[in-house]
Image: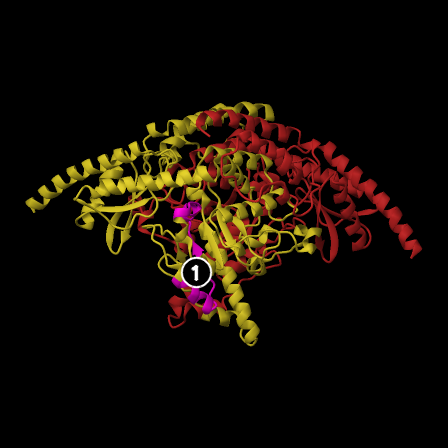
Chain colours: A yellow, B red
Amino acid sequence: MDAAEFRKRGKEMVDYIADYLEKIDKRQVFPDVEPGYLRPLIPDCAPQNPESFEDVFKDIEKIIMPGVTHWHSPYFFAYFPAASSFPALLADMLSGGIGCMGFSWAASPACTELETVMLDWLGKMINLPEEFLAGNSGQGGGVIQGSASEATLMSLLAARTKAVRQVQSEKPELTEADIMGRLVAYASDQFCATLGTTSCCSFDKLLELGPICNKENIWMHVDAAYAGSAFICPEFRHLLNGVEFADSFNFNPHKWLLVNFDCSAMWVKKRSDLTGAFKLEPLYLQHHHQESGLITDYRHWQIPLGRRFRSLKLWFVLRMYGVKGLQEHIRKHVRLSHLFEHLVLQDERFEICAEVILGLVCFRLKGSNELNEALLKIINEAKKIHLVPCHLQDKFVLRFAVCSRTVESTHIKFAWQHISQLATDLLKTWEQKHQQQ
Amino acid sequence: MDAAEFRKRGKEMVDYIADYLEKIDKRQVFPDVEPGYLRPLIPDCAPQNPESFEDVFKDIEKIIMPGVTHWHSPYFFAYFPAASSFPALLADMLSGGIGCMGFSWAASPACTELETVMLDWLGKMINLPEEFLAGNSGQGGGVIQGSASEATLMSLLAARTKAVRQVQSEKPELTEADIMGRLVAYASDQFCATLGTTSCCSFDKLLELGPICNKENIWMHVDAAYAGSAFICPEFRHLLNGVEFADSFNFNPHKWLLVNFDCSAMWVKKRSDLTGAFKLEPLYLQHHHQESGLITDYRHWQIPLGRRFRSLKLWFVLRMYGVKGLQEHIRKHVRLSHLFEHLVLQDERFEICAEVILGLVCFRLKGSNELNEALLKIINEAKKIHLVPCHLQDKFVLRFAVCSRTVESTHIKFAWQHISQLATDLLKTWEQKHQQQ
């Protein structure tokens, strides 16, 4: 395929994507396929000779779409949102077209520099303490990781390296293995200090944890993967109070800030804590600007060496939505979750299981776990909407997460009516079954 | 931006990318900017109100492009290739449009299943032993990681977990820390068994290493990040001999197989070695098909939880190029590296520093390291071509890597003529300087 054909096919693909997203509400949100559906549909090895774009293109609807869970359907209420917006898609196209690697400043200066500045923009949007920003001469700064897991791993490794070096400087007779065996990582069942847990969007009390960590010289990493995007709204910013005690902080614009995956924003107060742990300097990656100490080589900040030009997505989204546009998006989701909460509360067969703070509602039928498992099963088997469950203090709970960019109150009301009707049907057969027993 | 505007802007972006790649040879391969160039060019915080696409779009040429190192320029001979092709760009657009997360089978069945089958296709293309394939009932299988570093880390962690469990079963009185402190990882200065090192594309002798690892029950991971793509050509497949002794194997289609970053293909002989080390099963990620044991949940195979639909890129590229088209691409690059080698060998001022096997030529002026450092400096300062150096046995060596998809013999000849002329100029002043001293 040459550039001329790409012009043609690329435009067809743009239309296909626009069609897909415009009419996504017409598709069944969860697929009908069973495990192993795909293998029999395609050859068992790659073709020797090239196939045409048409051949490949028609297989999208035939082979791929029947097995897709439609995360951007307004009837998708499972997990947490996967962010998506048209500006982010455009930026990702550009990132692919440029196709540079950003492992060092010299490998593509724009890739590194835009990332540093965008993380400053984003940090300012959530009013992060200035120590976390790079600015012109700060010791902190931000980086785009692939996921919150990677940010947590990086923090853990940096914290470990820092602790080992500190102990070694005091007791040089100890080996690294001796020290490692005695290190302690304090964690909850969510691992680290978490703002907006996945199960029920609860918040750890940073203002209590933070001073203890600081006093005891414990690295504090704060993960706000989902909730972090909400902090751009002044009315939710108080949830981040205490971050000033943290050493590292992370949230995922690719969850709730309309930036397509992957874009996990991580900040540290001291860049040298990361680069000190991971510095890698083979000759083929060195460049003369390193000597100045002024530049950032992001390969020292992450597990992978290679990295895409991911900050373009942030740049496009922040500019084309503006802070106000993004705030509206967050507020709409929070408003819709409270609408759902309100509908649940009006039905006394149901209960709300955790305070609704952002876009997640945890609810269940008053009754046994088995009953709620049965309810979730019939909801997901009907495939009109899609939800996943969680456990809260041994209770089986249904999670209703407001996810899609295009979800509106009509979808929320439909979802509730549907759940309510299924519950009525279920309770009828459930009572009959129990009477028979 | 709504779908209607995306249709318009998406098509403009397709044209922009096509223009960029069609005329990339007209751009200076390495930028003129100095560290810190970008920050003064843009506001110091995000706009409150939305900006138009036009405003953002015009900043691409004004702010981004002046700081881009053009990896796809036919005058780019640095590092290793970053793969790029139009079919891969189209597939990535689709992946963004679908925007699903693939952490479990249920999160989007097509995303998981296409990946498993594509890794089987790719494994067959390089004639990987059947134990590494998933097939319908195999114990092995493949996964797309973000980078070779992640594949290596996963192997290391899986190997460690396996070793710890084995020792614990024999000596239950030992703690995990006791055992970890005594574990040994055997590595070279490239870390693990490597096929095609970054410095000079040399090959470890798997046929010697493998039997020892197997006999001593040592996990062997083989990294062929760059070279692996060449194994689709029968004439290079012998370089992979001995992989049958390995536990895990990895190469990067995003380097040399025309699949845009990120697509690092990793295979293991026993899936359970990975999933056993990393299994993560909160309720909200469980689904009823898990019980069957028939399905793959890729979150157990990697560090991140989230994952994009990356196998689409492989599917599009393998089908639209066909095995023969990809073989042609590899063979062209190898032919061009031998052309460059030939040109170097004809000039007795120069020497070749490592056997030219694939697309990399290591060469230098006969003379001191200082002389060669000076040569590289004037080459890169002229910015007509771009190279990076390496150290081979204390010698400072220039690496000439054939990179661009569109590079032809004219570009190679131009590069050599340019280097040769700069060497002539350099040697003249160098001799004068030394005569004066």
Q: Is residue A348 above or below residue B158?
A: above
Q: Position of residue B377 (x, y in %)?
A: 76, 48
Query: Looking at the figure, which quarter contains the N terminus of chain A?
Result: top right
The residue furthest left is A436
Q: Residue furthest right?
A: B436
Q: Residues within 10 Å of mark 1 (few under 14, many from 20)?
A: some
Residue A213 painted magenta: yes
Secondary structure found at label 1: helix
- Residue at (52%, 27%) from the top-left corner? B9
Q: Nearer the viewer, residue A302 or A347?
A: A347
| Observer able to see residue A107 | yes
Tag 1 subunit: B
Q: Position of residue B414 (x, y in %)?
A: 77, 35
The tally of labels here is: 1
Viewer-nearest residue: A402 or A245: A245
**Residue receiving disc 1:** B161
Task: Tell me residue B38's x, y (percent).
Answer: 63, 43
Above or below residue B99? Residue A149 is below
Question: To which quarter of the image does residue B44 belong?
Answer: top right
| Amino acid at pointer 1 | Thr
Answer whether residue B242 is magenta in the image: no
Where is residue A204 drawn, in percent x and y? 37, 57
| Position of residue B341 in the picture relative to residue B266 (left or right) | right
Does B330 appear above or below A135? Answer: above
Q: In this orientation, does residue B69 appear?
A: no
Magenta-highlighted residues: A208-235
